[in-house]
Amino acid sequence: MGTVSEIDLASADDAAARAERAAAFVPGPRGPERELPSRVVSSRVSLRVRIRDLWRARELFVFLVRKEVKVKYKNSVLGFVWSMLNPAIVLMVYYVVFKYFLKSLIPDFALFLFSGLIAWNLIATALPGSSASIVANAGIVKKVAFPREVLALAQVGTASVFFFFQSIVLALFLIGFQYAPAWSYLPVLLFALVDLLILTAAIAVYLSAVNVYYRDVEHLVAVLLQAAFWGVPIIYSYNTVYGLLTKHHLLWVARLYLADPIVPILLSFQRALYGHVSPVIPQTVVKAVIYHGHPALQYVTTRAAIPVLASYPYHFYVFMLACVFVVAILMFLGAMVVFGRIEGNFAEEL
Amino acid sequence: MSVAIEIQGVSKRFRLYHEKYTSLKERVVHAGHVPFEEFWALSEVTAEITSGQTVGILGRNGSGKSTLLKCIAGILQPSKGQVVVRGQLAAMLELGAGFQPELSGRDNIYLNGSLLGLSRREIDRRFDEIVAFAELEQFIDNQVKYYSSGMYVRLGFSVAVSVEPDILLVDEVLAVGDERFQQKCIDRVQQFQRDGRTIVVVSHSPDMMRDICNTVLVLDRGRMVTMGPVGEAIRTFRERLIESGFAPPPEPDVAEGGATGAAPVEIAPHRRQVKITNATVEYARQEERPYIETGEPIAIHVGFAVATPIVGVRFKITLVTESESIVFSSTSGGPIEEMALDPGHGTVTFWFDSMSLLDGRFGVVVEARDSGGVVLDILDPACHFEVMNPGRAVGIVGLPMRVEITPPGAWPADGAATALP
């Protein structure tokens, strides 16, 4: 027997027919009953969940970094060679200016400069891009749900790729000029690199969120980076500053200077890469700088020399970097919290 | 059945800045008194969506339906309350969001796929399928900036559906590409339904809802009005729409001379022997509700004025949809065509015993012609009426229909075939 049912289009009581239809949509068993991932959307999501989500987006991170690198040198003939050429030229300019015009007396100045500059470049490339990252990607932030921190971190990742290219230049440089780095300090160098990445990531995440509210941040970052470059020992040596401050009985300022988390990282880079060549500055000139306006004293101390690098023992480097590590991790978690607090309004603020 | 989405007292507050201060200087200068208004895009919406349902969120513009969808998707965080989502979720709010014009289609599939939460291996596995569905085999290694807009959205849709989520959120994006591709998209969504996945669709088109949803949630100014079976929810929605004056209720009287519509026929003054003065509709419970339901009777009264005596006038009535398609047209016929009319006023009434039109607002165009078919006057539109369809049928006309099913194995062994009653 066929089942005959009449559907009167206009009748209001086709609820039965509707129920039938609804029943037809009852899902059949879709494989074994599996545990469905559950997610809560609310304005208060725990830090643990945020970090878990971020970790799950690591492949997205890789694709974003790849995109950034590809897009940056798309349609350019030399491509990523530019990312090596750029620091090489900057290095050359600084070298010529400081070695010959400003008469820096640090021996093998180019190498000293390069070992600090390479670390600094990572920060200086990552931060402007990452602070603008959320605003620049407003299109997807408003339309797709994903951990938005990835956008800022991808900029740090991109900067790391360029860091890698620059490392190749550095390696070529070392081979070409026959400098050997301090091999025993290689673990210190790697530790410093880890610190540097976490620290940069923390600042990047924080700035990217704040920039949504205060668009000044991306401009401010450019200015502050300029200033900070001269505030950290890249072109001059840490010991010069240290000597200067102790002479003026400002030891606490020297300690404070070391508390800048970037400084121990730079010192470690310099120690590992530059440390093997005789790092001594002839004292005369240093004294002249210190006792500017007292030429008599200059004469007295000609024979002595101070080392370019701080004479800290190995374990002190490790200790400093461990401190920076803790600080960087805390900063990163703090940045995640801040980011999470204001992320809820990103889609409307953009 | 398990609950796929729990919306628990969700409210979303937006700040409407009169002038937005986004720079530090402006914020400092205007500290403390940044002028803004609070605006609750959603207030206290609570609903449960069981898995396997296809739910439509219906509301007019600004009712908060997209905001609700974004809260479910996790793009916006609710100011109050929370949404619990069980199962993998994919949202199609904008197709191809995040496509990089400089990258190839291939790279964009990977980037977009991972943005939607696919792992690299999953994309590898589905890659060919995605390309085939988007019909972009030849162009997949071209930069996306050289794609046509059709290719762009096709690729976007293709990546989005490849996520194979437990819950799919769709925001009025199904109207994609040409007609054939649209059909493919709808087929894919129906496939999702058959697989027992949960779908949430946002639209302001009741027809689309009727097509694919089992349940409809109606929002009005951020508040949930109702959530229930399609027909009833859509009726509530349209009642609200009419009440709030958003869709103007049918005007009983249109100004003389058909001033509103541009008359397609230029009528010479000496021809104006008969003038159509007005037209009104009449139906049951007219004072309670500004619409009829499909299948109910309706009368259209047309008033006319005769200027000079005339023999033989025919009146033509035409029903048109909002998009000006003619659904019905007929002339009065009968004795009136031979009647001698003296100067003065008269009326002619058209009765429809069962108005079988489905949803929509329909216009009535009335023409008066002489016995030779020459147009004497035309009123376009003469009046409007609104029809509400309580059933599930979609389209313009509700045709009477019977359904007969012979299930497999039920074929009678004794040879007694089913016969028409």
Image: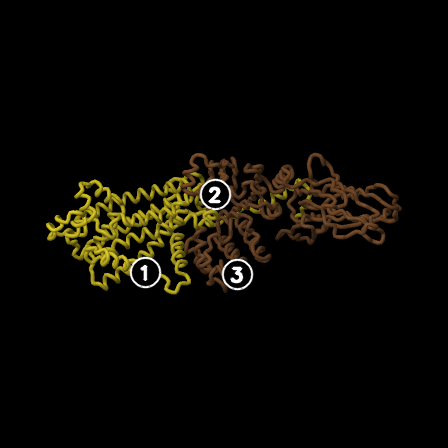
Chain colours: A yellow, B brown
Q: Amino acid at mark 3?
A: Glu
Q: Which residue is found at the position 56% from the left and 47% from the top?
A: A25
**Residue that numbered label 2 is attached to:** A348
Judged left or right of residue B29, residue A18 is right
What is the chain identity of the residue bearing mark 1? A
**Residue that numbered label 3 is attached to:** B135
What is the crowding at mark 3: few (fewer than 14 residues within 10 Å), some, or many (at least 20)?
some
What is the crowding at mark 2: few (fewer than 14 residues within 10 Å), some, or many (at least 20)?
few
- The circle drawn on residue A84 is 1
What is the crowding at mark 1: few (fewer than 14 residues within 10 Å), some, or many (at least 20)?
some
Q: Position of residue B112 (x, y in %)?
A: 45, 54
Q: Amino acid at mark 1?
A: Met
B62 or B418: nearer the eye? Answer: B62
Instruction: Provide the secondary structure element on which disc 2 rests.
Output: helix
Q: Which residue is found at the position 32% from the left and 60% from the top?
A: A84
- Asked if residue B203 is positioned above or below residue B221 in the image, the reply reads below
- Asked if residue B414 is positioned above or below residue B11 in the image, the reply reads below
Image depth: mark 1 or mark 3 in front: 1
Labels 1 and 2 in the same subunit: yes
Instruction: Provide the secondary structure element on which disc 1 rests.
Output: helix
